[in-house]
Image (cartoon, rainbow, N blue to C red):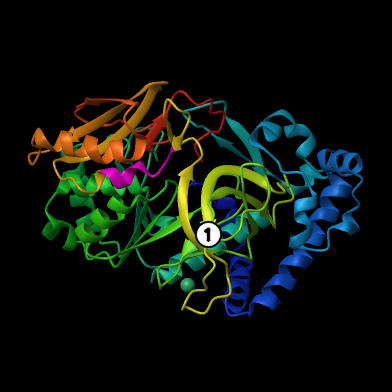
Amino acid sequence: MITDFNLRTFFHPWRIVRHRRFLARAERWPADRLKSWQDARVRELVRYAYEQVPYYRELFDREGLKPGDIRGAADLPRIPTLTKDIVRERAADLRPREFDTLRPVPVRTSGSTGTPLQFYADRDLAIAKFATFWRAWNRAGYRIGQRWALIAGPVFDDGALFRRVRSMNALYVSSFNLTAETARRILGELLRFKPVFLRGYPSALYEFSRFIGDPAALRRLGIRSISTNSENLLPFQREQIEAAFGCRVFDVYSQWEQACVIAQCERGSYHHEAEYGILEILDPLGRSAPPGETGEIAGTNLFNRAMPLIRYRTRDLARISPKSCPCGRAHTVVEAIDGRIEDVVVTPDGRRVGRLDAAFKWNAGFDFAQVVQDAPGGIVVRLVRNEAFRPEILADLEKHLRDRVGAALGIRFEFPDRIAPDANGKIRFVINKQLHSPAPVP
Ligand SMILES: [Zn+2]
């Protein structure tokens, strides 16, 4: 998703600038003003969906709902949620009658697990999305026009390692085949290009910085800030990337389907971008989870008419903070984004254990770790060892893992030379092959 800003988006520079100015004003609104703006958008979206989209017409009629029953975001829970399976099965019915006039752009997810999912984005969505990301990059100190570089996934069809993109004043770097040798070539090109801002997948930036190893070499780049996106940023990755580049990481959470965006502010808090979507956190029964409790992120995008997704279940986990942020924004603070529902290991007694990354933070001795559950009774811990590796580390690591997964789960270690990314160029920290996972990687 990090590279999918369609060039057509930029045929409307004035509309992007106008939306960015709106976002600058709305960012300072008090909570009640933000809420009434959202409520008006929700009413408009629901009316449109009912009048134009066969799936919603059928759903509302079946539930005995009228568009007027939804007066704002607080009434959304009256509408049943939308799952990835429904989007896959009812894709044609989720398009509005005026679909063709919106000149929709297909967005296809190509996840490594499960069946691909296709949805459509219209121009209004593209403009709102770019302006929303622009605001998030501004908070990280980036100004449009400054040089930046992207380190992410398989960016080029022809397998090129990097390429300058003049129209964007950017250097795009593919992290798909990162090795010590390609990392040095990338560093050389970055030194020539001199970007002030870096964007990328956390795993790619992490791996790149580990391959370079020498913080002095990376700091010569003079990168002022970094924005990560597309994967769950793990604490040990943030620590390594910030220390290696000598600047701060500003993380952004979003999905291919653009249900909602959550981005970090200058104070480090994650804020839900309320001018882009509606955020809900759902408990396992699909009810609204209270602040402080982890649940599934469900999002409602407020702009896309080409395929309106109302209460779209992302399969990602987060919890809302009951606290506000000292930055003064009224936008909901999200305490933690906990990765995907499937990113857990399941113990023999049926317990689902997430956040295993915490068990790894005590150890040096390896450059990368991955946990794979390929059998009900056991996991494989894959470690890419480095020169600091000592065999004693394994006993210590197993102890920290046992504290979390218990004694009954089998733990086996493997030592590959590297951990290969999936087809999207992403490296997932936990892969559970036992859980049925139809959800593609966003
Ligand atoms: Zn803040």
Boundaries of the magenta span? 353-359
Relative side of 364 to 1, left or right: left
Relative side of 196 to 342, left or right: left
Q: Could you tell me residue 368's position as x and y percent?
A: 24, 39
Q: Could you tell me residue 320's position as x and y percent?
A: 54, 60
Q: Which residue is drawn at 32% across and 37% down?
A: 160
Q: Could you tell me residue 124's position as x and y percent?
A: 68, 57
Q: Residue at x 74, y 72 (%)?
A: 36
In terms of secondary structure, where does tag 1 sit?
A: loop
Relative side of 415 to 199, left or right: left
In the image shown, does 359 or 250 lie closer to the viewer? 359
Residue 354 on the magenta span: yes
Q: Which amino acid does label 1 sit on?
A: Gly
- Let me know if residue 173 appears in the view: no
Q: In which quarter of the image is residue 157?
A: top left
Location of residue 312 with respect to 239 vertically, above or below = above
Q: In which quarter of the image is residue 410?
A: top left
Residue 185 on the magenta span: no
Q: Mark 1 points at which residue?
A: 292
- Let me know if residue 405 appears in the view: yes
Q: Could you tell me residue 102's position as x and y percent?
A: 75, 48
| Few, some or many residues within 10 Å of mark 1 (<14, 14–19, 20+) | some
Ligand 1 is within 8 Å of the C-beta of the residue at disc 1: no
Location of residue 287 with respect to 23 vertically, above or below = above
Relative side of 210 to 372, left or right: left
Q: Which residue is drawn at 16% across and 39% down?
A: 180
Q: How many marks?
A: 1
In the image shown, does 36 or 6 lie closer to the viewer? 36
In the image shown, does 160 or 33 lie closer to the viewer? 33
